[in-house]
Image (spheres, coloured by chain):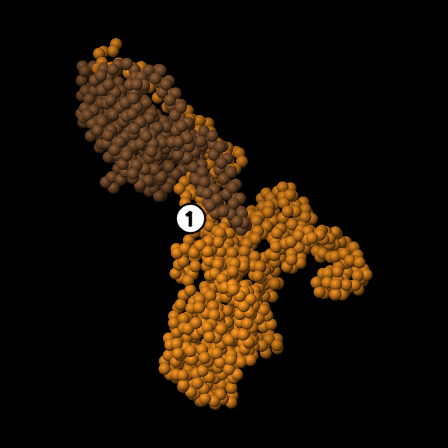
Chain colours: A orange, B brown
Amino acid sequence: MPVRSPAGLVEYRAQYRWAAIVITLFFLVLFARFFLLQIVHGDEFRKHQEDSRHRVTRVEARRGRILDRNGKVMAFNVESHDLVMFPSKTKSPENTAERLRRLLWLNDEDAEHLRDLIMVGMENPGRYDKVVIRKHLANEYCPFDSHKLVNLPMLEERLWCSQCGRDLESIASNEDRCPHDRDHRLRWNADHMGAHCRQCDREFVAASACPHDGMALQERKYILKCPECSRRYNNEKAIIEPFLYEMPGFTIETRLRRVYPYRNVVAHVTGYLGEVNKKDLDRFPERYVQRDRVGRSGVERAFERELRGTWGKRYRIQEPMEPGGPLVELPVPGRVDEPMINGATVRLTLDMDVQESLRRALRYQRSGAAVVMDTETGEVLGMYSTPSFDPNRWSGRLTRQAHQMIMNNPYTPMMNKAVTAYAPGSVYKIVPAIAGLHNGVIDFSTEVECMGAYVFGGRKFRCHNRIGHGPMSLVHSLSHSCDVYYYWLGEQLGMDVLHSYATEYLGFGRPSGIGIGESTGVVPNKDWHRRKERVWMPGFTLSTAVGQKDVRATPLQVTRAFAAVANGGDLVRARIVKQFEDLYGNVIRVPQSVVDTKLPINADELAQIREGLWRVVNDERGTAFNARVDGIEIAGKTGTAEAAERKAGVSEELSRWLKDDHAWFVGYAPARNPEVVVTVFLEHGHSGSKDAAPVAVRILKDYFARRAQDAGVDPLPNPITNLSKDSVDDENPEQPINRTPIDIE
Amino acid sequence: MMRTSSTKNKFPLVRFDWIVLAVIVAIIAIGLLNLRNVDFYHPRFQLLHQAQLKWYLLGMVAAVMVTFVDIHLFMRLAYPLYGLGVVLLVLVLFADPINNSRRWLPIFGEVIQPSEFMKLGIVLALARYLHDERHEHGQTDRHSLRTLVWPMLIMFAPVILIFAEPDLGTAIIVTLIGFSMIFYEGVRWRSILTGLGIVALMFPLAWKFALHDYQKARVLVWWAPESLEKKVEVLKEQEGALLRAERDEQSVQPEQLERIQEEHRKLTRILGKAYQPRQAKKAIGSGGFYGKGGQQAVQQRQGALPELHTDFVIATWGEERGFIGASLLLLLYYLLVYWLLRVTKIGRNRFEALLAIGISATVFWQFFVNVGMVTGILPVVGVALPLLSYGGSSVVSTCIGLGLMYNIVIHRRS
């Protein structure tokens, strides 16, 4: 019986009841829900949890391209398709091996190899997650040299031998001449079944059995060919793909492969890629995984970071959508994917036309290098080292044999000789010349009498002219390359002074700043000798002054030093990179040309030196007079350095070569107002004036001829676009690539 | 249910009141234990449970203070406190956003969430208004829409501000609290129906104009996940195609690629966030009957639940303690809410009764929406679990509310 309650409370009774019921109901709902989740579906959920896996997948970034200054592509990427097998999922390996053999037209040996690969994979299921069965399936690019394949105008038929794998062309037995090069005769075998053309190296057959092993031949048709190596192909990837579903466990993986269209012309500059090894993986576990490729030499290596880009990361949970159902990938809440950033494109200062001319100029030389540099900016327009190699081979199928051959080549094709240090010989004489002028030891009129030899310390230091040049001034000493003058000068200055001028003002013994791996050479001083040989004799100074004894310089360093003389006294840093761009062509960063130091001599003194260098080529008694050409005025210096080496176990011929002197020539043109400097170095090339100079002059001639041809067009065009103030930075190679990160909210 | 003043107890509280006090203490203890384990899974959050302890203590002090103050003080302060709350809500809209929403104001080195305290403010204001209505103006009929104008205003003004932060969850809760109080007062049937009609009309408008993309996405994911998933699939395809083209050095418009990537990423994140309840269900469900034991929750170790310390605290508890633990928690809160409801009958005037229903509604709705959300019955809307979720403002305001309840109880029983 409700007692008198304070105002209006009594009507809450109904509401209270309703509220109590509603609340109780809602709680029961929750209770039931927990029951459902935990009791009824509890085991399912538990299993679900066990089935789910966190996956972090890598989104691969595209490696940046390498271009020359005009945009010609020197390195780019193509798709490469590999046939891979997952042993845990493979069912009928025998059948698959057989089928692949037929699809790919494998000869017996290759078929055997394929079967072995498959079997090994199958027999050790735990050991291999994935086995690569065949790399570089032919698709768009030639597996041999990465050239783009073209369609044959007509289906080509060949006769194929399943044992040796040769493709033979069918031919009538009365044919005399090669159907491809009409003017060459065919050489028929003794049994007149098979023939061979020496010119194009093709094989022909007039019967239905292989002339080499007698196997019955099969007909085979081709639709593609490589314009470069002339090999015939079919689209292996397209052939295999439709049958993949019948070959469980097999799939085609696509990777990106590097292609160098100019091959050996720029091989030393671009460098090449190699597979990551354990050391790389240990040092940068976040950056590389197994089978990644990383730059091993040249620009590929020096600018690996910029070219590589950054992986993207995808965080996903992989689990069955419903318990026991198929796996799906779901995003991980709270974890944001990291965007992939493609590698930057590196545009070099190199000019392919110049580079080509270097290759042509050096093509008859056994071993050597040439460098072309812009005198004002230090930009390297060309850098070639001979013999060279094809970097494509190193990123394709390189056989052990080929590898051995390259490594055993006595002319060391893998070395970039433009940045390797050798005894410079007379080109080094500008060091004492500048030191002498600046120190006041010599002036324009100082004369030294050359009698053919210089006596010092009980020894006779011979001049290359045994009779003697007579009285020599600075200018003459350069144009005649008189050794005595410099022996004397060297004695006056002393070893340490020579060392300091060479290293502080002319960049010897120091990195040139180019960025790619280079040798810094050697500029000895007293200490160095003492440490190295435990003795220093004053006589060493004399030899050092003429670029012998232990001095070592690279062609690049020599170029740089002479560029300083040519441009009026600025020692510019060597540059190989013009700018970095993103993949849309926008400029990311432009390294600036840097002047490292200025030559300490004044304009008059420099003019004297340049006069001497001018006379080298243009005075009839200059050491390079015979090399001069009409149309361009060249100034420069020859150098012939004693460099006799001995190697055990080499042929007579090679020994003779090794004993010869190194040949150098550095020249700049036009002499009055120089634009470019060229250095030619011929390893054991014999004579600077007779051998190196003509090559250099040739190079300069080609350079200016091309210039005249492109008359009206700036030969060193500057295709810089979108240059904004922010993207121009100041020589800091550690500055990170400045691509705007995509904002994730 | 009334105790006559003849039985003058020594202690002003009956046994149930003491039991509930124990219940509250138990809940706090569970909260601390749970948070300590949450900290264990996420070393980043190391000291959350310690911070929370601080808030519990502060809350209890405030509760005690509130309990022994004359309730008339609150009657007088109802509107001013409400006004203060509104001012703070306006101020907070100008604060720096954290996680893209402006909910927190920095004060004295800590941050407070005005929306939490606004709940109290609204309860006080509504209680005062409706009390005045009856006592001052003698209104005894059920409300019609006309008479509800002011209460609606009182309720919706802060709701809109809260919604603008944006904080959908708290806005919804406040609306529910307001409606609970008003309905408890009594509304005419006709008005109820008309009101529902208006809401039904507003809903599509709100969907189109008022809701943010991510809020819509959350609802969609709960209601029809396939549509969002399909959208994401399409985007993934587009992005993949563009990336492949880019890689093959065909010309690609950078803006287009970036736009698609942007959207793909955004939707993926939303989808990921919306998979929270899926992961939470999995976590809770895998607890089974006995649970996995303290610090043994696999789900949390995988790091799949980001709001572990706030909205999804129950998930850890569920996975660790199983059905037994979950039922225990349900029981505790049920007792609490039931007791709160009973306080409505103890109030000696409308104000107190309404205060009681307001506080009950606050605790009940928050609890229900949060647990419903975590277990997948309701879409994810970001509502904290009172006394268990980490958050100073939530803890302190809840404690103050409970203190007010004890205030009523003590003064009535004696």
Residue located at (27% from left, 20% from top): B344
Which image quadrant for residue A743? top left
User: Is A639 situated above or below A54?
Assistant: below
Name the side, left or right, on which A639 lies relative to B402: right
Q: In the rendered image, is residue A744 in sight?
A: yes
Chain under disc 1: A
Q: Position of residue B379 (x, y in %)?
A: 41, 30
Which of the two residues, B37 or B201, is positioned nearer the viewer here? B201
Residue on which disc 1 sits = A741
Residue located at (50% from left, 72% from top): A679
Q: Position of residue A572 (x, y in %)?
A: 42, 68
Please state, as top left, top right, bottom left or bottom right, where the N terminus of chain A lies in the image. top left
- Residue at the front extreme? A712
Residue located at (39% from left, 68% from top): A596
User: Is B388 situated above or below A123?
Assistant: above
Q: In the rendered image, is residue B315 in sight?
A: no
Which image quadrant for residue B50? top left
Q: Position of residue A321 (x, y in %)?
A: 50, 34
Name the side, left or right, on which A305 lies relative to A89: left
Q: How many marks?
A: 1
Which of the two residues, A505 or B77, is positioned nearer the viewer here? A505
SS type, badge 1: loop
Which of the two residues, A353 or A116, is positioned nearer the viewer here? A353
Q: Position of residue A733 (x, y in %)?
A: 41, 60
Residue type, mark 1 in image: Pro
User: Is A679 situated above or below A186?
Assistant: below
Please state, as top left, top right, bottom left or bottom right, where the C terminus of chain A lies in the image. top left
Residue located at (29% from left, 39% from top): B95
User: Is A731 situated above or below A446?
Assistant: above
- Residue at the right extreme? A174
Pointer 1: residues within 10 angstroms few (<14), some, or many (20+)? few
Name the side, left or right, on which A302 lies relative to B39: right
